[in-house]
Amino acid sequence: MIITKEYFKKLYLDKFQSMHGKEITEATPMDQYLTLGAVIRDFISRKWIASNNTYATMEDKETYYFSLEFLLGKLMNANLLKLNLGEICTEALEELGIHLDQIEELEPDAGLGNGGLGRLAACFLDSLAFLQLPGHGCGIRYKYGFFEQKIVDGYQVELPDNWLKYGNVWEIRKADKAVEVRFGGNVRLDQADGRTLFIHENFDPVLAVPYDTPIVGFRNNTINTLRLWSAETTMKDFDFSTFNRGDYLNAVKYKYEVESISQVLYPDDNHLEGRVLRLKQQYFFVSAGIQSIVRRYKKHHADLKYFHERVAIHINDTHPVLAIPELMRILIDEEEMGWDEAWEITTRTISYTNHTILPEALEKWPIDIFQTLLPRIYMIVHEINERFCSSLWQKYPGDWNKIRSMAVLSDGYVHMAHLAAVGSKSINGVAKIHTEILKNQVMSNFYDYYPHKFNNKTNGITPRRWLLKSNPKLAHLITDTIGSDWLQDSKKLQQLEHYAHDPVFQEETHRIKQHNKAALAALIQDKYQVAVDPNSIFDVQIKRIHGYKRQVLNVLHIMNLYNRLREDPNLDIHPRTFIFGGKAAPSYYMAKQTIKLINTLASVVNQDSRIKDKLKVIFMENYNVSLGEQIFPAADVSEQISTASKEASGTGNMKFMMNGAITIGTLDGANIEIKEEVGKDNIVIFGLTADQVLKYYQEGGYNAWNLYHGDSRIKTVLDQLVNNFLPVGPDEFRSIYEGFLYHNDEYFVLKDFSSYVDAHNQINQLYNNRYKWLQMSICNIAHSGKFSSDKTISEYARDIWNIHTIPIPDQPMF
Ligand code: 26W
């Protein structure tokens, strides 16, 4: 059915009246937004039902992506694009006096993630639906998402992200699908018919209530489901037993404690704080998710023996690793299966991705805490460990050190990555180099033991959001130039290479970049009252603030450049605007000081008229998905400067590339594969290699003081951190200074400083050759299809999950 503008208007007006019971002329912007959400939902719902019915009745496999984080961003515009309703909707609403772009602004970002891992999960869901693959998400419906960042006096201040304040137009609460999750208590053993029974008693029950969000396929009929669980008290426990005993205050406290499980996303990124509530969150959603999958399976299949042929469960890092013992528990305790059969099924169902090698991010939980909270799960983990250690003993008799280093339980801890390695069929890293480091360093013992489990799946990003939605002008230019096939197959972007030297195409690309830069400059002017010149080079580092990502290296280079400009205001450099964005974990002092340092430097540089506007520094507050959508299309230079070996993959690097920015980066994560794709002349590489870094860590021999004394540029900028050069107390940045000199520069910032400065000089030269720069930029766009999450997901589907395309039949619209 063709939807006309008139028809859309009628749908909208009817919906408005039935929802709000007043005239459209009295609509508030929020009324307008909620009405449009409801209209779009109606377009989705038929297809959603059809997708669910198709999946339920097919004889094929479905996959479930378990993740503690899903960083979706806004959905309205994305859904309109996918349903191909954007134009009709814009025009219809205009005639009603409603501006779509204005009401879209009202939608809060769904910010249920910290950074890379959470956004990857969102891109993967998008690609699953695009590829018509039966794959769903499972996570937590946090009441508060990732905190909102305000900058006050240069410092980060955290505010709660109350994203559900006005309701959520996309979710549907499924109260009838709620399940119970049990914490604490004790396990009593009993015997029946020659079987040992494990009876979990005196537990605290928590009701897990699912909220389903449709994941819309791009111009197809597929609607998959993201199921997020919310923690509630079971009515019977709250209202009747406790309350009736007259213990009102305790009843309220109990309700509060239960609900706290899905209250807030932990803002930890690459660092485990180890709060018991986090472990509760992990078991809560994993148990609820697996129970609901088993329940659904049993509706259509009699025998759990074939579970792994119908269900694949993927765990996004170790956060959902309790899926392994939880599936064992259900198969053994509830389905009365024997251990060996249950283990066979579990280890054929579950697959695991590792996203980080930083030791402080590897999850481990004290055994006593684990056992108290999850007594039955602990017994199962204990048994897994016993059996695993005895098989290790077979292979490595007497090698206690090796066995201890691989055990699931050792030194008083449950080691979650070891549990993941033992209990899943596949272990993958997220970029080639990362997988190699896993195999040869971090998990080398496991690689020796289970070589067949290891594989690489280089990350990707969805071109629907990161090109089509966020950079519509570039998307149109591409379609005008090579046709629209790239929308169905991102590899086709490669055809743009033929136009890399075409002056007309170059000029069009340039015009669009300037347009996007002007829009970002206007936003910066509006928000921060700083004038930045769209003709300057926009050099951008947006990502979490972390020592290993080395925002401080970027800062030291800017300080050096500033020093050069003050010495010689006529220095022949192309004007630069350095843009930063990113959040620090609230308890990460050094990261927060880095934000203060960037803002302090900005306040000095931006006001210094001597340097003739050749340098500007901007810190953009509250970096999130929506802000990213405005920044990536406006970037000329992409800063990917992690200490080599530390950034597992990176995905921001791919978003910049897809929007035509040139990478300045180390040979780390996916930068290496970007270099392989575009060739060494279309990327600017600097710094230590991963091998060199790892060698330093193993053998020592690095001395930061030597660099400080040996390079006057380094000495000057480090001294400027503590000598009143910056308008703060002399101790404000002492910790950063001491990190370099007294803690020997853990992330090799000083070591890479010189080659980083050279790399920036190279950027300057390249940019001054407009023809060359545009050719490089187009080459990057042309090769970005390699980093489409469609490609990544096709590989997961083929190599790990064994799931297949399941087209959903056309549905009558209403
Ligand atoms: C336990 C605390 C904690 C929280 C989050 C530890 C680790 C994490 C994540 C695994 C950190 C993360 O987001 N890693 C990033 O994952 C991206 C997607 O694969 C990669 O592109 C990034 O390089 C990696 O840092």
Image: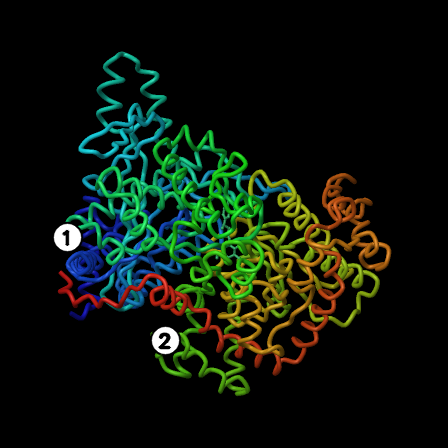
Q: Residue furthest top?
A: 246
Who's the residue at 80% across and 69% down the image?
Answer: 570
- Secondary structure under tag 1 reads helix
Q: Nearer the viewer, residue 200 or 336?
A: 336
Contact (CB < 8 A) between labels 2 and 1? no
Q: Nearer the viewer, residue 473 or 663?
A: 663
Q: Is residue 306 left or right of residue 706?
A: left
Residue at 42% across / 73% down in the picture? 475
Residue 147 tag number: none
Instruction: Confirm or reject: label 1 Cβ below 8 Å from ligand 1.
Output: no
At horizontal 50% and vertical 54% (from top left) the residue drawn is: 446
* Amino acid type indicated by mark 1: His
The crowd level at tag 2 (other Cα within 10 Å; few <14, some 14-19, many 20+) is: some
Where residue 300 is drawn, which disc sits there?
1
Q: Earlier in the sequence, mark 2 or mark 1?
A: 1
Quadrant in which residue 47 is drawn = bottom left
Q: Position of residue 6 (x, y in %)?
A: 19, 65
- Is 463 on the left or on the right of 41, as rendered? right
Q: Position of residue 217 (x, y in %)?
A: 29, 64
- Hey, what amino acid is under mark 2? Asp
Would residue 785 appear left or right of 636 to someone viewing this image?
A: left
Quadrant containing the N terminus in the rendered view: bottom left
State which quarter of the image contains the C terminus.
bottom left
Q: Position of residue 760 (x, y in %)?
A: 70, 68
Of residue 698 and residue 793, the one placed in the foreground of this image is 698
Q: Secondary structure at mark 2?
A: loop
Q: Residues within 10 Å of mark 1 (few under 14, many from 20)?
A: few
Question: How far apart are the two marked residues, 2 and 1, measured between alpha carbons?
Answer: 35 Å
Q: Which mark is residue 489?
A: 2
- Front disc: 2 or 1: 1
